Structure formats: structure tokens, C-alpha cells
């Protein structure tokens, strides 16, 4: 059995007299995808906020990669992606600037899937340095290494496919084409913002993904692409916990489905 | 004699540990500063893309300051320390206080503030990144006004430290007050309303002081009056500054405490 990535025991959280989450036990291992299903107001979003350390539980314990997420919020940031129900961006920034900002603030190493012109890389042993992703430690060029790892597919094409969808190539380039993108976030549609949010969340291969209704607002094609990406991440060892209203989506994706009353 | 090698070894161990801790903490600090700069860059872009913020926080203080210098040259009133006090208060109240309050309210309404809590930035880094553009703009504006002040007949101050102290603690009070005010500002459009008492506390105290030869304790409690008293003292040279210093320190501490109690990262539900 893989290591436990997410663990909650006897978790309760209340807003005043209203008990949003009551006595929840939850375990997600590395390489496991768990779906949380529940009606509106059942406490799914609250539970994810607690798991990410944005809210302290009123009772119970939470561990993320073995750490208390409320106490080790910044330490966990490079390893944990959290996508909230609504995309949270500064409207005046462009899509590329937004991607730069949030990936940079996560303190996360890059991956080959990241949009080529928005990549950042941390040098080994130096968390503070950020340079263009050009030269991995083994001396192989990033482009060649990316192609090798991705079975011949170029990282640029894969990035576009994963993040923008083949049918919306132009839109994907506009959203995630790096500095050439001039579209401000406030001018993007809900679905485009959602894709940008997911692009930020997936950048850098986080070990834990906490996703609150991640497919809300996506078209069917983008949903399928996203589901394929999640399966790849799960196969690569990521622990994924996502909430959804869609029972069929949960059944198709998840190793386990948990229902919140 | 046997104690000396043990002491030497212990000393070497301690110094080695200190070096390791220092390197680790220096690396962590550099990383945090790097992240804060990433945020500050994004906030600067957002500031410059908002026409209202550019007018209110970038152009208005310079125009008001230049106007004050012109008037003081023509009328002979409000020169030297008084002029420096007014310029400092224009910049602190319009840029650092009102500008930062508006930005904080906007980021919280967009749920960006709570998202920042899920990043690698510690709280101090988030605060620094959010207010850094306003601090930079205020420094540039004061530099510009200081450059043109001699043309308006303003002489050089006799001592600099009260000016530096006034700027540093005035900035601290303005930033803390911005966070406190943002707690009561549900939308950025409301910031012009909610910052009015704070702007009056800065500017009103200074205007009242201009008509008085000396500030009494009641007036000194108002931040603007204490700041103006300090800038006056920079030019008069021998005027007592400790009452103003003390009140500014107490005001800063009180504002920080208030901010810690009332500030929220998420909008009220």
C-alpha cells in the first residue's frame, strides 16, 4: 500500500451553531483518486478548506503528507494544489501573467506539461532561484527530455492539448501561450478561467490535488481531457481528492466514492 | 587544561550550528522575498491598469503636493517643516492608506487574499507583496516633491532623523490602518467612503496644527499632527520631538493590534 497522503479523523467544523462537517474520517493514499459527493451545503468545500489548512477544524485531526496543514501551510504549498469552487484571480492581469504569478507563488518545480513560455524552474538545492527551464540536471535539453518522456509528443503540443483542448487550439494559445497572451482574466469566460485555474493547479506535478468541483463550467471535451489528465497524475503517484455533484463522473473517475450526508 | 579543548570543540560546534541555521534561514528569507517580489510585480501591474487608482494614488498626491509648494511660495505660509509635513501626509493618506485599502478590498472581494494563504508565502510576505507597489510609489513621489521643493524656497532640514522616523512610522500606521479599514470595506468602490475618517485623521490633524504654534496632547493623538510636529522639528532643530515620537509609536502599536483583531482574509458571509 502506498503512503498515506491525506488523513482526517473525527473531523468537525462549524459556523456558529451550524455544523458544516460532522465527524468525518478520510484517508487517501498516494496514487489514489477519491471523489467526495454530496448535496449543496453538505460541507464538501469546508472539508477541502480544512484539509488545505485555510480553516482550523473545531474537532478532529488532519494530516497532509504527514503534516498539520494549518501549521505547515507554506511548507506544504509546493506539494499541494488546491482548486476552489470559484476561480480566484486578479481581473486586471492577463492569463499568462496570472499563470506566472500563481505557479511562482506555489514555489513548485516545473514539469514538461507546463506551457513552454510560462515555465519556471528551481535549481536543485536552491529553492529561491528561478530560471528558464532549459537545462535539467542530467544535461539533456528540456525539449528533448520532454519529448522522450511524453512518447514523442512535444511538450508544447501536449501542454496545449492538456490545457486548452485540441478543438480550441487558438483559445488555448491565447490563454496559455505565455507573454504573447494579452487577454485580461476579467475578459475570459467562466470555462476559460476554470481551465486557467486547472493549468495552475496541475503545473509542477504536485503530490496532492484538492479539487473542489473542478469540472464545473467546462465543456464535455475539456472534461474528458481533464479526466484523462487526472488518471495520468494518479498513475504517476499523486493523491487526488475531488468533489463533484455528478455521480456518473465520480463513478467513472474514482477509486473510492465518499458521500457526505 | 582539559576544559580548554572541550570548550573549543563546543565553540566550534555552536558556531557551526549557527552557520547552518543562518544559511538555512537566509535561504528561506531569500525565497520568501523572491515570492513577495513576484506578488509585488503582479500588484504593480494591477495598480497601473486601473485608471481610478492611477488618478487617486499616483497623480493626485503629486498634484496636491506641487500645488501646496506653489501656494506656500506665494503666500509665505506653510513652508519648510510645514510643507514637508503636508507632502508626507498627502502621500501617506492618498497612496499608502487609501490606495492600499482599495487594493485589499478588491483582492478580498475577488477571493485572491484567501488564495494567497494557500501559497508558499508567509503572512509577512503576503503583506509586503500587497503593499510594496504603494510603498514604492510613495517613495518616488516624495523624492520628486523633495527635488522640486528648493525651487519653491524650501531650505534643507537641520536634522534628518525626525523626517526618516516620521516616514517610517507614518507608513507603518498607514499600512496597518489600510488593513483595518479593508476589514470594513466589502467592495473596492466603498473604499472612498470608508477611508474618509482615516484621511481626515491624517490631513485634518496637519491642517489644524498649521494654525497653531505648538501642538497640545489632544491634538498630538491624531496621526497627522504628530507627523507634522516631527517634520517641523526637523527644520527647527531644537524643538522637542519626544512627545510626537511617543504618540506615533503608541498609535502604530494600537493600529497593529486593531488590525490583528479585525482583519479577515475572506469576505464576510
Image (cartoon, coloured by chain):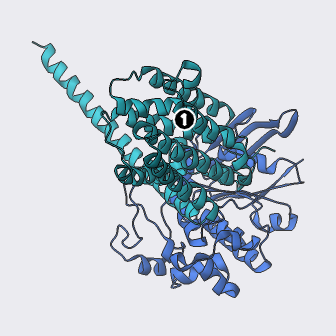
Q: Quadrant of residue B45?
A: bottom right
Q: Residue, x 24% and y 30% (percent of image)?
A: B15
x, y (%) of residue A131? Answer: 39, 66
Residue B17 visible in this rendered orientation of the protein: yes
Residue A33 placement, left or right of B164: right
Residue A139 placement, left or right of A12: left
User: Mark 1 Cα within 10 Å, few/some/many (few <14, many 20+)?
Assistant: many
| Viewer-nearest residue: A220 or A3 | A220
x, y (%) of residue B119? Answer: 57, 51
x, y (%) of residue A243? Answer: 78, 57
Q: Residue, x 73% and y 41% (percent of image)?
A: B184
Count the marks.
1
x, y (%) of residue B24? Answer: 36, 42
Q: Residue, x 66% and y 69% (percent of image)?
A: A185
Residue B239 placement, left or right of A240: left
Q: Chain of mark 1?
A: B
Which chain is displayed in blue in the rendered image?
A
| Viewer-nearest residue: B108 or A244 | B108
The tint chain B carries is cyan
Q: Residue, x 63% and y 70% (percent of image)?
A: A232
Residue behind mark 1: B206
SS at mark 1 in the image: helix
Residue B115 visible in this rendered orientation of the protein: no
Give above or below for B254 relative to A1. Answer: above
| Viewer-nearest residue: A222 or B159 | B159
Furthest toward the front, the residue is B75
Amino acid at each position: 500500500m502506498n503512503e498515506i497522503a491525506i488523513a482526517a479523523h473525527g473531523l468537525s467544523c462549524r459556523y456558529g451553531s451550524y455544523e458544516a462537517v460532522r465527524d468525518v474520517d478520510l484517508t487517501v493514499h498516494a496514487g489514489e483518486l477519491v471523489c467526495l459527493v454530496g448535496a449543496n451545503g453538505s460541507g464538501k468545500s469546508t472539508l477541502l478548506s480544512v484539509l488545505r489548512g485555510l480553516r482550523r477544524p473545531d474537532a478532529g485531526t488532519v494530516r497532509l503528507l504527514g503534516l498539520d496543514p494549518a501549521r505547515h501551510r507554506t511548507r506544504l504549498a509546493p506539494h499541494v494544489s488546491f482548486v476552489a469552487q470559484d476561480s480566484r484571480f486578479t481581473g486586471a492581469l492577463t492569463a499568462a501573467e496570472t499563470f506566472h504569478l500563481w505557479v511562482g507563488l506555489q514555489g513548485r518545480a516545473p514539469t514538461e506539461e507546463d506551457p513552454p513560455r510560462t515555465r519556471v524552474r528551481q535549481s536543485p538545492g536552491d529553492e529561491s532561484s528561478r530560471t528558464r527551464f532549459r537545462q535539467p540536471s542530467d544535461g539533456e535539453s528540456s525539449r528533448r527530455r520532454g519529448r522522450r518522456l511524453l512518447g514523442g509528443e512535444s511538450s508544447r503540443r501536449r501542454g496545449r492539448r492538456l490545457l486548452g483542448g485540441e478543438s480550441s487550439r487558438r483559445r488555448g494559445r491565447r490563454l496559455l501561450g505565455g507573454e504573447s497572451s494579452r487577454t485580461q482574466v476579467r475578459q475570459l469566460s467562466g470555462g476559460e478561467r476554470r481551465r486557467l485555474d486547472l493549468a495552475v493547479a496541475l503545473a509542477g506535478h504536485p503530490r496532492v490535488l484538492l479539487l473542489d468541483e473542478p469540472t464545473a463550467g467546462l465543456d464535455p471535451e475539456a472534461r474528458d481531457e481533464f479526466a484523462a489528465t487526472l488518471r495520468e497524475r494518479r498513475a504517476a503517484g499523486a493523491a487526488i481528492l475531488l468533489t463533484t455533484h455528478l455521480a456518473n463522473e465520480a463513478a467513472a473517475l474514482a477509486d473510492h466514492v465518499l458521500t457526505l450526508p | 587544561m582539559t576544559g580548554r579543548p572541550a570548550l573549543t570543540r563546543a565553540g566550534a560546534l555552536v558556531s557551526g550550528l549557527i552557520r547552518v541555521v543562518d544559511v538555512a534561514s537566509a535561504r528561506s528569507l531569500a525565497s520568501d522575498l523572491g515570492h513577495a517580489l513576484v506578488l509585488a510585480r503582479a500588484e504593480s501591474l494591477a495598480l497601473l491598469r486601473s485608471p481610478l487608482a492611477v488618478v487617486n494614488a499616483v497623480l493626485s498626491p503629486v498634484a496636491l503636493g506641487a500645488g501646496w509648494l506653489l501656494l506656500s511660495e506665494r503666500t509665505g505660509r506653510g513652508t519648510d517643516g510645514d510643507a514637508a509635513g503636508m507632502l508626507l501626509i498627502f502621500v501617506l493618506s492618498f497612496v499608502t492608506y487609501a490606495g492600499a485599502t482599495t487594493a485589499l478590498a478588491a483582492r478580498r472581494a475577488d477571493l485572491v487574499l484567501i488564495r494567497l494563504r494557500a501559497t508558499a508565502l508567509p503572512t509577512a510576505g503576503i503583506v509586503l507583496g500587497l503593499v510594496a507597489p504603494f510603498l514604492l510609489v510613495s517613495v518616488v513621489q516624495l523624492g520628486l516633491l523633495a527635488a522640486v521643493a528648493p525651487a519653491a524656497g524650501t531650505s534643507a532640514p537641520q536634522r534628518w532623523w525626525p523626517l526618516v522616523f516620521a516616514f517610517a512610522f507614518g507608513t507603518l500606521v498607514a499600512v496597518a490602518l489600510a488593513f483595518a479599514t479593508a476589514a470594513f470595506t466589502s467592495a473596492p468602490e466603498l473604499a472612498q467612503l470608508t477611508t474618509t475618517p482615516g484621511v481626515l485623521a491624517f490631513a485634518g490633524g496637519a491642517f489644524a496644527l498649521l494654525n497653531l504654534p505648538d501642538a497640545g496632547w489632544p491634538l498630538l493623538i491624531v496621526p497627522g499632527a504628530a507627523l507634522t510636529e516631527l517634520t517641523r522639528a526637523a527644520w527647527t532643530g531644537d524643538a522637542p520631538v519626544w512627545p510626537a515620537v511617543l504618540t506615533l509609536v503608541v498609535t502604530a502599536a494600537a493600529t497593529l493590534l486593531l488590525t490583528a483583531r479585525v482583519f479577515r482574509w475572506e469576505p464576510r458571509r
